[in-house]
Image (cartoon, grey):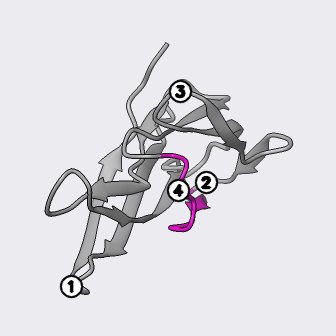
Amino acid sequence: MYVPIYSEIYVINAKTKCLLTSTLSVRNTSRQDTLYVLHVDYFDSKGQIRKSYLEKPIQLYPLESIEFVVEYTEKEGGAGANFIVTWGASSSNLHPIIQAIMIGSTAAQQGISFVTDGVDID
């Protein structure tokens, strides 16, 4: 699953950036099946891998969730950063919710927050 992340966005003009903290949320929506999260990889705007978040696969039990954070001090991802989340399940009926939440504040201390949804890719 591909999840867009914005570790920074432009405000006011093309030279002024606002850094954001991004949280990737992976949620098992099943009441009975286990979700297996195999890989969680973070890529920058140029498609280069910046970080692999898992050393080994993890299990999310029914209705369990997990979060992965890209801190606002991470300046390499850029406005086109993304996560690729690879997952599996014993049931083909399991459809996890995978989203990213970005939050930050501008120079005027105005808060910015928004959500992006993951999309299935090959």
Q: Residue furthest front?
A: 15
Specify start and end residues of the magenta stretch as a single range. 63-77
Helix, strand, or loop for circle 4?
loop
* Residue 40 x %, y %: 65, 40
* Residue 20 x %, y %: 41, 65
User: Is tag 3's residue or tag 4's residue first in the polypeptide sequence?
Assistant: 3
Neighbour tally class for label 1: few under 14, some 14-19, many 20 plus, Cα within 10 Å: few
Residue beneath disc 1: 108
Cα–Cα span, label 2 and label 1: 42 Å
Q: Which mark is residue 47?
A: 3
Residue located 58% across and 35% down the image: 85
Residue beneath disc 2: 62
The answer to the question of whether label 2 and label 1 lie on touching residues, with beta carbons closer than 8 A, is: no
Neighbour tally class for label 4: few under 14, some 14-19, many 20 plus, Cα within 10 Å: some
Q: Which mark is residue 57?
A: none
User: Is tag 2's residue or tag 3's residue first in the polypeptide sequence?
Assistant: 3
Residue kind at label 2, given as amino acid type: Pro
User: Is tag 2's residue or tag 1's residue first in the polypeptide sequence?
Assistant: 2
Q: Quarter-wise, where is residue 104 in the image? A: bottom left
The answer to the question of whether label 1 and label 3 lie on touching residues, with beta carbons closer than 8 A, is: no
Cα–Cα span, label 3 and label 4: 15 Å
Q: Which of the pair 76/119 is nearer the observer?
A: 76
Residue kind at label 3, given as amino acid type: Gly
Helix, strand, or loop for circle 2?
loop
Residue kind at label 4, given as amino acid type: Lys
Residue beneath disc 4: 75
Q: Is residue 7 left or right of residue 67?
A: left
Residue kind at label 1, given as amino acid type: Ala
Residue 4 belongs to magenta span: no
Q: Which of the pair 120/88 is nearer the observer?
A: 120
The answer to the question of whether label 3 and label 4 lie on touching residues, with beta carbons closer than 8 A, is: no
Residue located 44% across and 55% down the image: 7
